[in-house]
Image: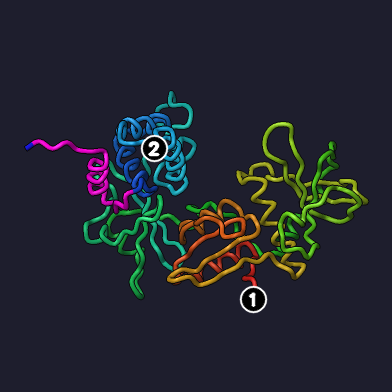
Amino acid sequence: MILIATPADVLTTSHRFLSVPDDGALSVAYVAAALRRFAGTVCPCSPKTLLKVMIDSHRSLMSDSEEFASQVEAVIEDLVSVGDLLELTDVVAVDERIKGTWLFSAPPGFVIHHGGVAHIIGLSSDEQTPLPVAIRDRVVLQGVSRRIFPADGENLGPLLKSLGLREISSDSWLRRPRLATAHDLVTRAKSRLSSMERLGDQDGIQVFNHLSEHRSYRRCWEQLANQSGQFVIRRPQAYGADRWGYAEIASGQIVKVLEFPETGDRSRGCDVAWRLMMALRSLEEHPVSYCLEKVGDSGAFDFFFPIPDWAKRSLRFAGEEVPARACLMSFDIPVAQVAAVQHFLAEMLFLAQQSD
């Protein structure tokens, strides 16, 4: 008997083939799994090629092709972010004729992160997750990430190494800055500022007043007026994002400015500035705070202050970013990893839990 397969039937079969739970919606986990499968075959290629292969394979299965294309583009970027795919700038290409932002499949590996959790990265051409079946069954899919949670007292590092996976340090994977105390971070900024020169155009400059007792991030910003002291500033550009820096101000005039990012630093200027703001507020004994509540088996973290990309990446892989709960951003973190995340926030960003 011949049966006509519906789009839903095809997607259900595809979910089963990729070992992704089918909840009736086109999840990020499914799109990521399908892209890994295609990448193992077509990479190296351009992002557009991988996008086209994915869209062509799902043609007539999606009711909104434009929305699907946008979702696939976003997931490709996330796969680069987690390390499953590598851009040309991250690898050495033998063929010098390869130009542009080509994608390469990362070799199988893992990263041990908060709470001893192993994040599986990379892919192979013939396996969705390059692990033996017994270990593969322990993999938990959360968005684009693939995680293995350790049993009590278990060290996953030696086990995964014995299976041929390479270990990547957490610092290299997260691309986070060096560890520094709030005092050291501010002292370095002051030292670097002392050798800088006066800023030319001062139109439209805003000053972040870290001395303010306002908890609201937005209410701490002021127009350049009669301030005196050293403050984080930002200024608009005709084209592109705002420029950020640390400035010495005298009676409303910029005397010197250390612009972010500094030469040779690949960080975003805003990420450098936000971390310095947090350090400055910490030294003034009114640190930036976050709200933490226990909700079921998770710790619900709510942030009212922007945090750097590398910190958001760490939180995403410790748990899951969820719709903001009357704040700037929210994350749900498994209870077992809450203490490690709190330590990370205090050590790297000088954040404190909001008191009741």
Q: Residues within 10 Å of mark 1 (few under 14, many from 20)?
A: few
Q: Quadrant of residue 348?
A: bottom right
Q: Taking the image as drawn, is residue 107 in sight?
A: no
Q: Nearer the viewer, residue 302 or 346?
A: 302
For this orientation, the residue located farthest to the left is 1
What is the x, y in percent for residue 173? 47, 52
Amino acid at the residue labelled 2? Phe
For mark 2, what is the residue? Answer: 104
For mark 1, what is the residue? Answer: 356
What is the x, y in percent for residue 60? 30, 32
Q: Is residue 67 above or below residue 15?
A: above
What is the x, y in percent for residue 284? 77, 67
Q: Quadrant of residue 120?
A: bottom left
Q: Nearer the viewer, residue 297 or 252?
A: 297
| Residue under the image location 66 percent in, 51 percent down | 272
Specify whether 284 is left or right of 346: right
Residue 246, which numbered label? none
Q: Nearer the viewer, residue 42 or 306?
A: 306
| Residue under the image location 44 percent in, 67 percent down | 334
**Which of disc 1 and disc 2 is earlier in sequence?**
2
Q: Nearer the viewer, mark 2 or mark 1?
A: 1
Q: Quadrant of residue 213?
A: bottom right
- Colouring mode (rainbow / by chain / secondary structure / one colour): rainbow
Quarter of the image where the N terminus is located: top left
Q: Is residue 341 above or below residue 204?
A: below
Disc 2 + disc 1, Cβ < 8 Å? no
Quarter of the image where the C terminus is located: bottom right
- Magenta span of residues: 2-24
